[in-house]
Image (cartoon, coloured by chain):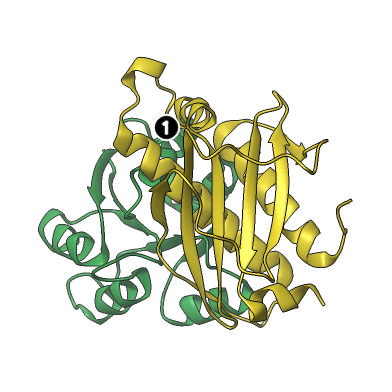
Chain colours: A green, B yellow
């Protein structure tokens, strides 16, 4: 069973992402929800997830800082990170990919977009 | 009469894409552009645009419409919807709309930064003189408004 962390300060966004995951066949995945980057980082260190889906714009610790911490951690640096954001454009996307993000998805997320972003992950 | 400049189109498209994708609701320009949302039963959320221009966006609608949208977003029955669901869904709608709006307006190599949405009820803050208002409605003719304030943000229409 896959273990997925979803980090977003919005309950609505987390629910919407979970619904997309169910639609693309990840309904039986174990979902760990976090309201900000710090919570997601702590969960990632404890729970060894298979993938981390995170928003950018969050209180306490934003998604970009979370990404930097994950990539700097010897324990977590191989963890695939997908950014799901309302503040994305090609320039920001290039910056985040440079920092080590696997994919950057713009909100509103949809099942086909999610499917495409997680294609490699689903094939594992 | 609505001016159909890039700023206007950028917002219309952002609202339409967001509501259709998240709540399965179509939106269009309101047929009566003199229509004002009544202050009673009004809910709204505000979000700062912090970079590269400064301004603020407000999304306002009746609580009845917000309940409708929230039941669709969360796939809940009306009696299962809580105040938290309502606040959070309105905030997330504006967050998504704001991102698409800025993305539609700015060049591909231009990054932008949004603030965190803040929920409010009752009368909207008084509009600034240079505000731009989008008077929209759903396919069920439920009205909603988006307001952009801040001279640098509104100047993007030029």
Which sits in the foreground, A8 or A117? A8
Identified at 73% across, 27% down, the residue is B139
Would you place residue B86 above or below residue B108 in this image? Answer: above
Quadrant where the image shows the N terminus of chain A: top left
Q: Is residue B118 left or right of residue B27?
A: left
- Residue A69 is at least partly visible in this image: yes
Q: Residue A21 appears at what percent x and percent y?
A: 43, 38
Chain letter of the residue beneath label 1 in the structure image: A
- Residue A108 is at least partly visible in this image: no
Q: Is residue A66 left or right of residue A18?
A: left
Which sits in the foreground, A12 or B6? B6
Would you place residue A111 above or below residue A57 in this image? Answer: above
Would you place residue B89 above or below residue B57 in this image? Answer: above
Q: Is residue A60 left or right of residue B101?
A: left
Q: Residue A116 appears at what percent x and percent y?
A: 57, 50
Q: Residue B11 appears at what percent x and percent y?
A: 71, 57
Q: Is residue A114 left or right of residue B32?
A: left
Q: Residue B14 appears at what percent x and percent y?
A: 67, 53
Name the residue that disc number 1 marks.
Answer: A22
Identified at 29% across, 66% down, the residue is A59
Which sits in the foreground, B145 or A63? B145
């Amino acid at each position: 069973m896959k273990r997925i962390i979803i980090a977003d300060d919005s309950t609505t966004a987390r629910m919407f992402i979970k619904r997309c995951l169910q639609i693309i066949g990840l309904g039986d995945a174990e979902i760990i929800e976090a309201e900000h980057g710090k919570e997601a980082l702590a969960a990632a260190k404890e729970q060894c997830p298979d993938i981390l889906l995170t928003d950018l714009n969050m209180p306490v610790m934003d998604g970009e800082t979370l990404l930097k911490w994950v990539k700097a951690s010897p324990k977590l640096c191989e963890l695939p990170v997908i950014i799901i954001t309302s503040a994305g454009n090609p320039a920001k996307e290039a910056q985040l990919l440079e920092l080590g993000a696997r994919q950057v998805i713009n909100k509103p997320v949809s099942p086909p977009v999610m499917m495409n972003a997680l294609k490699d992950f689903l094939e594992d | 009469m609505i001016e159909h400049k890039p700023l206007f189109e950028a917002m219309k498209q952002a609202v339409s894409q967001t509501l259709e994708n998240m709540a399965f609701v179509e939106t269009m320009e309101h047929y009566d552009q003199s229509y004002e949302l009544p202050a009673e039963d009004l809910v709204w959320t505000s979000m700062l645009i912090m970079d590269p221009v400064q301004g603020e966006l407000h999304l306002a609608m009746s609580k009845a419409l917000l309940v409708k949208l929230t039941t669709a977003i969360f796939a809940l029955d009306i009696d299962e919807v809580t105040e938290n669901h309502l606040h959070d869904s309105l905030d997330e709608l504006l967050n998504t709309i704001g991102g698409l709006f800025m993305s539609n307006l700015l060049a591909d190599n231009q990054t932008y930064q949004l603030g965190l949405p803040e929920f409010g009820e009752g009368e909207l803050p008084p509009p600034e003189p240079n505000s731009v208002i989008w008077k929209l409605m759903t396919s069920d003719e439920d009205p909603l408004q988006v307001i952009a304030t801040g001279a640098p943000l509104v100047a993007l229409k030029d």
